Image: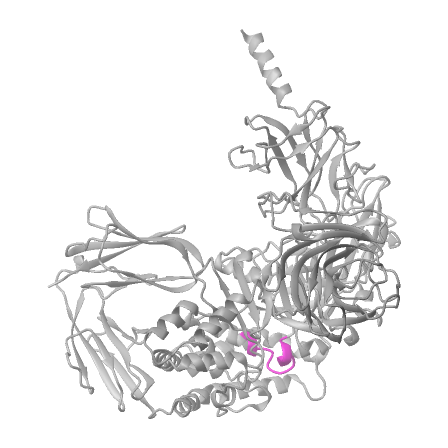
């Protein structure tokens, strides 16, 4: 029996081992970090998997499954597709999860339609049209073309290769052109467009109207813009359609197209006739069947699995960590021998590759801070290894200096970049170590290693002011050292100059982007602390913008202020000392990159659900249609009607808009609203539009702006910007108007109090003050000095002290109000309860604030544990002084005191907790549940009775950092009202559980 078990065990092992020579379908080659190896029909270079039929017969794949997890039930399922003997199938591991798209593919050869050629050469899919027409389409991608290959819309007089024509075209180099030939057999005339083409948004449109022809493209705002209007007398009947060419007779270009529309009606591709004009290779047309799995491949390596329809595992392949555009697979095709390939061969025969990578150089001393001279060496013990290195920041290449086993003497700060080489192997990854000697700083440090020629080359260097518009992306490396000067992160990345006019400054802002072609597609490190995100697609080391040599704090100051306003999320901030190629390079502000990935991570949204619009018209991500629809609905609403508020509230996060405007106005942002306006929404959130605070450098008295400056009257005019027109329209609604005025008052009575603002400013200034003398030694001059910096901070404090009183006057003037008045609040017994005034919960008494006369607001008495509300004492006239909720309509100064009294049996009342509270308590028909969390996290709130039975789930969702409020209406899950008595509100998160005792009481 024992031997039978051993035999069975051995047989099971043999069966489990993949046997490529016997399997029908095998994984032949994979690419886990694709940069340029293969592009899909969305013009994206996704990960890919190449399958190979190693059998002598056709294999039908319908029902087969593939996954990067060993789970048949959760694996991606193949559609009805077959592979012949020796045939290959390319699958994109893109996480797009599709087997079909509505894209129409045209493959074509031909030398193209060019201004320097008499003879056109292209594939033409067309119909005959009489008279005027208007045709448009969207080009998602154009691949495998030469320099003049194109896809576009064209009208021709005939199918002759020298015929008159007019058309608008997209090119591989991501540009648009309008081309016209007005006489047969002549050179065409070309008109370029000022707009860059960004696939997959290659929108082109051709229109004929009488004797005129119009060529259009869509700008970044998604709106049609005319490239050219030309006089073009032609016969009534013309050939109109799609033209595709590759620029070479022996090459087939591939264009992916959607949204073909003629005269505002969809046009069926099958209705088009086909002509090959001056081509040697006939093209073809078909609907896409490109395969995309529901997973991506890990660049760190993992295992892939394939099952047949019966759930039997027929193939698995483990692959190692791979760098950009290096694939891993079988050589020869279908063999068990595994090699690395560069270039890769998706869909083609695998060529001889390399068995592996060279081992990385091993430094004897880690990167860091040192006080004495260092003797550096590499500790690799392989005699076949050749290590090359640089000390000036230059990328290591096969021509770099060779390490000769002698110590490298380091007696000043330096960056060492090293790479190992070995015959018949890929070179190792480049290792970068920074060594800082005899330096100290209390701040964290970033060290950049960037080839000097990429920075300062007069022909192309990104630091040369002749090449900053647009900003090209180059490769480099950066290392992060914490406050104790331990290296905590290092990565190769893409980088480019960032900012507006500040990119002309000597110390330029740098945008770091994670891409697989450099190292990784994300930066996996909690740059802003353990309580925030730990994965980023990009970050920015900002020079403080236009505030560079002024306060160097204004934008960061506003960022910290905004963190106290729940509806606002500005880019996080941390100050960093920087070194460039071992040399001190001044202070930077580490900031988040405000893009679709920022929104995706902060709000837990899929990026494809996000629309992000800049300056009211430019698409940063997504589409603009919904934004235009929102504006149209608001501008077409009668704001005098009560239902208009519901319309606004359904389209816009009103609280976000009010807080956004209040902070921009109070801070006196002189670079707004004609600039720096970003707005976003997501159907996966609630569809409402929200505005994003950013670039608040020109605030708090910048360039001598006085605290008395009235930004409301200066900026909030219909002719200022499209955004202000929208806001002024919304303000026509009286409910929004009163809400804006009262919330602005709340903010000036809390977050924007001068004492609070000075404390924040002094703290931020104290963080960077020890570094400022060195900063000005590096970047200052006879005008901009350390002493001048201190004076500018003093001016900011003056602005802070005086701004609120001026701002109240500006609000009175803008809305034609009857002034503002002081409101004093108190309680009769210290600690007996709170008073909510408008949106503020006041617990420290006595309290004073200012609100606006004849603008009604609410107050509410909230008893604490063991207390009940009795009555109000006030200089105002309340209709019912024992009602805990009151409406206040000021005529002048007001004093209000809430009277509470003890309740003997405190066991039946609420348990105080700073993070969870409920009010009013006891309650009658509804109770507010208030939850405060430090960071966004998943939570559940439920109501239980005394027996521990769940009566109702209030929420199971993500709570955003800050204050979250919910309402329980006193009903259970079935909608029935619960009886009077004691209940428990229970908040559960991953970290803890909080319980709050509440009482429902109805007379």
Confirm whether residue 201 shows in the render: no
Q: Is residue 432 left or right of residue 532?
A: right
349 or 898: nearer the viewer: 349
x 42%, y 87%: residue: 804
Residue 149, horizontal then vertical, whole percent: 80, 58
Residue 565, horizontal then vertical, whole percent: 43, 71
Above or below, 537 relative to 858: above
Confirm whether residue 412 shows in the render: yes
30 or 914: nearer the viewer: 30
Q: Is residue 183 left or right of residue 74?
A: right
Above or below, 780 relative to 117: below
Residue 946, horizontal then vertical, whole percent: 19, 49
Above or below, 564 relative to 785: above
Residue 745, horizontal then vertical, whole percent: 37, 82
Q: Residue furthest top?
A: 1
756 or 819: nearer the viewer: 819
Q: Is residue 553 magenta?
A: yes
338 or 99: nearer the viewer: 99
Q: Is residue 496 left or right of residue 676?
A: right
Above or below, 446 relative to 23: below
The residues colored magenta run 544-556
User: Which quadrant is the C terminus positioned in?
Assistant: bottom left
Q: Is residue 368 magenta?
A: no
**Residue 833, quarter of picture:** bottom left
């Amino acid at each position: 029996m024992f031997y039978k078990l051993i035999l069975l065990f051995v047989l099971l092992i043999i069966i489990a081992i993949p046997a490529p020579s016997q399997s029908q379908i095998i994984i032949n080659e994979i690419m886990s970090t694709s940069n340029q190896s293969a592009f899909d029909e969305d013009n994206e270079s996704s990960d890919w998997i190449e399958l190979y039929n190693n059998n002598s017969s056709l294999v039908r794949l319908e029902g087969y499954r593939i996954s990067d997890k060993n789970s048949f039930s959760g694996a991606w399922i193949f559609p009805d597709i077959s592979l012949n003997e020796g045939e290959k199938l390319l699958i994109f591991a893109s996480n797009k999860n599709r087997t079909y798209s509505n894209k129409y593919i045209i493959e074509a050869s031909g030398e193209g339609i060019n201004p320097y050629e008499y003879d056109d050469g292209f594939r033409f899919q067309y119909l005959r049209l009489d008279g005027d027409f208007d045709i448009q389409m969207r080009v998602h991608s154009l691949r495998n073309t030469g320099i003049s290959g194109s896809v576009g819309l064209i009208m021709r007089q005939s199918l002759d290769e020298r015929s008159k024509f007019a058309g608008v075209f997209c090119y591989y180099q991501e540009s648009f052109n309008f081309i016209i030939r007005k006489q047969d057999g002549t050179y065409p005339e070309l008109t370029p467009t000022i707009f860059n083409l960004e696939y997959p948004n290659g929108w082109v449109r051709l229109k004929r109207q009488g004797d005129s022809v119009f060529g259009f493209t869509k700008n970044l705002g998604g709106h049609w813009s005319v490239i050219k209007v030309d006089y073009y007398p032609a016969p009534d009947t013309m050939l109109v359609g799609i033209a595709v060419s590759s620029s070479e007779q022996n090459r087939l270009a591939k264009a992916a197209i959607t949204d073909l529309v003629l005269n505002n009606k969809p046009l069926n591709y099958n209705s088009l006739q086909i002509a090959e004009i001056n081509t040697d290779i006939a093209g073809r047309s078909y609907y896409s069947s490109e395969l995309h799995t529901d997973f991506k491949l890990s660049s760190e390596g993992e295992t892939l699995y394939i099952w047949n329809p019966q759930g039997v595992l027929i193939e698995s392949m483990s692959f190692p960590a791979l760098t950009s555009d290096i694939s891993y697979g079988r050589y020869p095709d279908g063999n068990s021998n595994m090699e690395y390939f560069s270039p890769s061969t998706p869909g083609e025969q695998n060529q001889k590759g390399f068995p592996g990578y060279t081992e990385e150089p091993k430094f004897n001393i880690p990167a860091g801070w040192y006080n004495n001279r260092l003797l550096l060496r590499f500790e690799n013990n392989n005699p076949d290894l050749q290590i090359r290195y640089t000390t000036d920041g230059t990328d290591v290449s096969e021509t770099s200096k060779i390490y000769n086993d002698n110590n490298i003497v380091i007696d000043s700060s330096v960056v060492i970049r090293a790479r190992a080489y070995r015959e018949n192997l890929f070179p190792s990854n480049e290792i970068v170590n920074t060594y800082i000697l005899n330096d100290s700083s209390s701040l964290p440090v970033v060290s950049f290693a960037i080839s000097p020629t990429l920075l300062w080359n007069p022909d192309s260097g990104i630091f040369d002011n002749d090449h900053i518009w647009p900003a090209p992306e180059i490769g480099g490396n950066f290392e992060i050292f914490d406050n104790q000067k331990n290296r905590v992160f290092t990565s190769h990345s893409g980088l480019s100059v960032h900012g507006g006019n500040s990119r002309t400054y000597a110390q330029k802002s740098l945008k770091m982007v994670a891409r697989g072609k450099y190292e990784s597609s994300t930066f996996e490190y909690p740059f802003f602390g353990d309580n925030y995100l730990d994965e980023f697609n990009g970050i920015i080391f900002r020079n403080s913008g236009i505030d560079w040599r002024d306060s160097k704090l204004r934008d960061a100051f506003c960022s910290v202020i905004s963190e106290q306003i729940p509806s606002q999320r500005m880019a996080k901030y941390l100050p960093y000392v920087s070194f460039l190629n071992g040399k001190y390079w001044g202070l930077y502000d580490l900031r988040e990159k405000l893009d679709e990935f920022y929104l995706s991570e902060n709000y837990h949204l899929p990026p494809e659900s996000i629309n992000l619009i800049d300056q009211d018209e430019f698409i940063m991500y997504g589409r603009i249609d919904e934004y235009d629809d929102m504006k149209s609905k608001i501008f077409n609403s009668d704001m005098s009607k009560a239902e208009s508020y519901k319309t606004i509230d359904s389209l816009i996060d009103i609280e976000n808009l009010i807080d956004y405007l209040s902070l921009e106005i109070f801070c006196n942002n002189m670079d707004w609203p004609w600039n720096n306006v970003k707005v976003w929404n997501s159907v996966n959130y609630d569809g409402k539009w929200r505005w994003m605070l950013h670039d608040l450098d020109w605030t708090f008295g910048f360039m001598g702006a006085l605290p008395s400056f009235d930004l409301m009257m200066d900026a909030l005019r219909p002719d200022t910007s499209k955004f202000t027109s929208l806001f002024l329209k919304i303000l026509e609604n009286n409910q929004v108007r009163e809400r804006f005025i009262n919330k602005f008052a709340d903010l000036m009575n809390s977050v924007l109090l001068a004492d609070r603002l000075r404390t924040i400013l002094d703290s931020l200034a104290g963080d960077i003050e020890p570094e400022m003398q060195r900063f000005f030694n590096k970047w200052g001059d006879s005008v901009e000095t350390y002493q001048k910096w201190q004076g500018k901070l003093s001016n900011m404090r003056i602005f802070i002290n005086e701004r609120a009183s001026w701002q109240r006057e500006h609000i009175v003037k803008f809305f034609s109000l009857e002034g503002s008045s002081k409101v004093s609040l108190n309680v009769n017994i210290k600690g007996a309860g709170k008073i909510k005034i408008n949106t503020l919960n006041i617990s420290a008494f006595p309290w004073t604030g200012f609100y606006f006369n004849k603008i009604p607001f609410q107050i509410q008495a909230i008893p604490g544990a063991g207390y009940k509300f009795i009555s109000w004492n006030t200089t105002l006239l309340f209709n019912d002084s024992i009602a805990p909720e009151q409406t206040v309509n000021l005529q002048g100064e007001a004093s209000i005191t809430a009277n509470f009294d003890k309740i003997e049996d405190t066991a039946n009342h609420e348990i105080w907790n700073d993070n969870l509270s409920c009010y009013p308590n006891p309650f009658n028909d509804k109770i507010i549940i208030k939850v405060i969390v430090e960071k966004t996290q998943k939570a559940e709130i439920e109501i239980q009775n005394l027996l521990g039975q769940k009566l109702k789930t209030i929420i199971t969702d993500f709570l955003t950092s800050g204050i979250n409020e919910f309402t329980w209406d006193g009903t259970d899950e079935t909608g029935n009202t619960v009886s009077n008595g004691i209940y428990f509100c229970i908040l559960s998160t991953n970290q803890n559980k909080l319980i709050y005792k509440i009482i429902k009481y109805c007379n």
